[in-house]
Image (cartoon, rainbow, N blue to C red):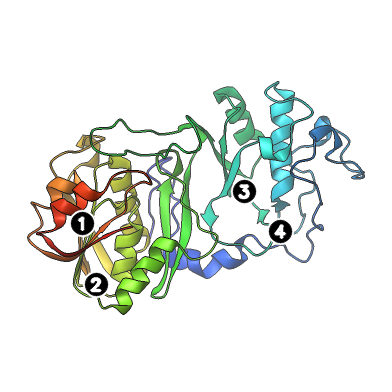
Amino acid sequence: MTIICPRCGSSGCVIPADMVLESAYTMYAACQSCMADPGIGKQTPFDRLFDGVDAIGGIDDIDDATMRCQSCGKRHLDLVVAHVLGILIREGLCDMQATLSDVGTPMITIGYQIPFPPRLGRDTLILIMNTIDKKTAEMIISEVSEVKGVIQRKGSLEHPIGILDTGSSPHTYDLLAGCDLRGDIVLSAFGELCIYKTQSDTHIEFSRGKSDKVQVLESLYYQRRLLGSVVDACCGAGTLGLVSVLAGAREVILNDAFLPAVKNTILNIRANASVLGLELEVHVDLSELPVVAGAPVLVATAHGSCDVSVYHGDLVRLAAVVDRCDLCLIDAFIGVPTAGFAEAWKDTARMVVTI
């Protein structure tokens, strides 16, 4: 099944989840011909970064072929980031005292807890950077084959991407070059999913192990709370609702007021269709929907192992649309008051859980 990337329009970005899960755990492994770990320090200034490495004397010695395995075509993550740092220094955005940590946040395109330093092939890294401009971002995409997309961070690290409520303006980062679609493998007692997201308009949520949120779902499952109708009221990319499908829920309703989240949720139903046993039907033209919604609109349904509905709207107003549900999950940003959300659902849901 070919799924078109919602960001760049290519047919290679979105790999069906069953194929991802078959290959991901060897995707970043070194082959027998790969060079040893280069042993460069993330806090070492660039002018001393390659002391003792005969093949590299300075910025001009690093290009796309530097220390690339001739057999598998991969390079160590630190070498890739060092290559990017060399470009930043060459273009005057950093000085020779800058370190690998100054480059930004590197995010592999299929994220999971890797027990070894990753080796990267083409289009397997997305960079979230503070010190960057569009011209240099385009240079990085052109010169460093491992880098798929370059995002400029806006605001503080603590400022979450998305909307705090339907009355707030969206906070997003700027995609300066390339494509920022990437996925995270989500582990649960019920199985695994690959949850894709357009990273510049979706908050970073990568767990070093099993997600705390998924562990809440597992606890609810063992209490037999996931077998009926489940509402994921502010679903984001759809993680909790789709894990609920895996857990055997009879019906799942996914909703978000932020349009990029709804688009990612629909994408994730498509990408995980074979794992979830679902067939999707989209009922509206997503391009005609507002970025932030008020009154809920049913945008898609899916059927098969479970009946799934996807809404775009305010989660409080959704409570008046849903006749009855067994469980309502409210996963708001940290610091957002949720008492009003829970109050709105108390007559509709048998149980409200704020995560």
Count neighbours of disc 3 (C-alpha within 10 A) and say few if under 14, some if 14 to 19, many if 20 or more.
Answer: few
The residues tagged by marks 1 and 3 sit, at their Cα atoms, a distance apart of 33 Å
User: Which mark is first along the chain, 4 or 2?
Assistant: 4
User: Which mark is first along the chain, 2 or 3?
Assistant: 3
Q: Nearer the viewer, mark 1 or mark 2?
A: 2
User: Can residue 355 be seen?
Assistant: yes
User: Which mark is first along the chain, 2 or 1?
Assistant: 2
Return the residue nearer the eye: 213 or 24. Answer: 213
The residues tagged by marks 3 and 2 sit, at their Cα atoms, a distance apart of 39 Å
The residues tagged by marks 1 and 4 sit, at their Cα atoms, a distance apart of 40 Å
Location of the N terminus (image quadrant): bottom left
Q: Which residue is mark 3?
A: 122
x and y percentages locating residue 271 in the rendered image? 37, 59
Q: Which residue is mark 2?
A: 249
**Marks 3 and 2 in Cβ contact (< 8 Å):** no
The residues tagged by marks 3 and 4 sit, at their Cα atoms, a distance apart of 11 Å
Amino acid type for the residue under numbered disc 2: Ala
Q: Which residue is mark 1?
A: 281
The residues tagged by marks 2 and 4 sit, at their Cα atoms, a distance apart of 43 Å
Q: Residue at x 80, y 34 (%)?
A: 46
Label 1: state its secondary structure: strand
Using the image, tell me which numbered label, if any, was put on residue 69: none
Q: Nearer the viewer, mark 3 or mark 2?
A: 2
Label 2: state its secondary structure: loop
Location of the C terminus (image quadrant): bottom left
Amino acid type for the residue under numbered disc 4: Cys
Q: Residue at x 55, y 64 (%)?
A: 24
Q: Quadrant of residue 248?
A: bottom left
Q: Is residue 309 left or right of residue 126?
A: left
